[in-house]
Amino acid sequence: MNTTPHDATLTTADGRSALRMERRLPHPPEKVWAALTDPAALRAWFPAEVTVELTPGGAMTFRFPGAGADESGLTGTVTDVEEPRLFAFTWDTDHLSWTVTPDGEGSLLTLVHTFGDRPGAASFASGWHLCVDALARLLGGVPAVPARERGALHESYIGRFGLDRGTVESAEPAGPGGSDLLVRFERQLVRPAETVWAVLSAGIEPVAGLPVPVGFTAGTAPEGPVTEVRAPRSLTYTVAPHSAVTWELREGTGHGARLVLTQTGPAGWDTDAALAAWRTRIEELAVALVNS
C-alpha cells in the first residue's frame, strides 16, 4: 500500500474545515462518473453502501458494513449533479463534492470534503486515500476492496496537516490571580482507549494518591501524585501546587480514541517548553501505537 499522501490540503475557516484531494486517473470522465454515481460500483470502493436519487434534492442513505437490519444508517441529500463533471451531496453534517475534469486522455478527480471536526482530518484523509486507491483499481479492472491501514498513513496526514501541534489558552476557571494558562493538545489516535491506556501505563495501573506512571509524564511535567483516575478513559495528576496534567481518551472518528491532553500552569510559566515536551511525548505514543 502507498503511504505517501495524495495531493491534499486542509483549510479551516469559521469552525469548518475543508479537505481537498486530487488524483489523476487514466480513464475518461464518463467512466469515472459511472464509478462515482452507480450504487453497484460505489459498493466496491466507497466506505458505505449507498442508495441515491441522482438529482438535485434527491435522497441518499449510507449503511456501513456490519450494520444490523434495524440500523437505519446515515442520510444525506444530493446538492449538485452535472454529468459527467460534478456530483455533490451532504452526508449527515458533512458535505462532499466530487469533480471530474478532462486531463489529457484521462481525468483529474478532485474531492472536497467539508466538516466540523478538524482533529479528525487525518482519519478522513487516510480513509479517502484508501477509497480512491480502490476506485483506481476498480477502473483498472482489478479487485477494488479498500486496503487495511495500520496507522502509518493516518500519521503521515497528521504531520502533513499540522495536527500534532498544541495550543496555549486561558484556563477556565482561572486559578489564583485570574491568570492561569492551559496547554492543550487534541489528537486522533489509531488504537482504542484500552490499547492506548495499556501503552501509557506499561503494566503499572495508576492509583489515586500514588505517583503517576512515567508513561503519562513529559520532560516538563515529571511524576506527581495521581488525583483522579478512571481507567481507561481519564487521569489527572499534579506537577506542582499550581500545575496539573489531565489525560482524556474520548470517542473519536472510528479509527481509535481521541486524546485530549491539558496542563495548567501559573502566569509566567514556560508554555513553549511544555508545548515542545508534550508534542514529543505524544509523538512517541503515536509511534508506539502504530507499531502495537
Image (cartoon, rainbow, N blue to C red):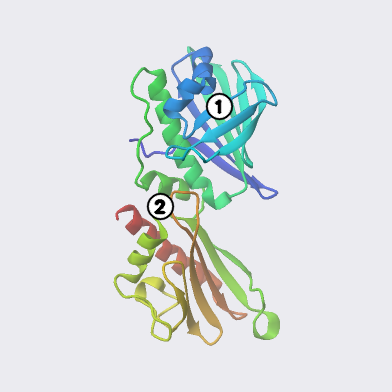
The label on residue 51 is 1
* Residue 67 horizontal side relative to residue 58, left or right: left
Residue 77 picture location, percent across and down: 65, 31
- Foreground mark, 2 or 1, reads 1
Please tell me which residue is depicted at 43% across the width and 83% down the height of the picture. Answer: 208
| Residue identified by numbered label 2 | 190
9 vs 253: above or below = above
47 vs 120: above or below = above
Q: What element carries label 1?
A: strand
Residue 221 picture location, percent across and down: 45, 77
Q: Earlier in the sequence, mark 2 or mark 1?
A: 1
Q: Which quadrant would the N terminus be assigned to in this image?
A: top left
Q: Which of 232 and 122 is in front in this view?
A: 232
Type of amino acid at the residue the image marks with label 2: Val
Q: Is mark 2 on a helix, strand or loop?
A: loop
Task: Answer yes or no: is residue 194 visible.
Answer: yes
Q: How crowded is mark 1: few (under 14 residues within 10 Å), some or many (20 or more)?
A: some
Type of amino acid at the residue the image marks with label 1: Thr
Residue 119 picture location, percent across and down: 54, 52
61 vs 84: above or below = below
Residue 116 picture location, percent across and down: 62, 48
Q: Quadrant of residue 141?
A: top left
13 vs 273: above or below = above
| Number of numbered discs on residues | 2
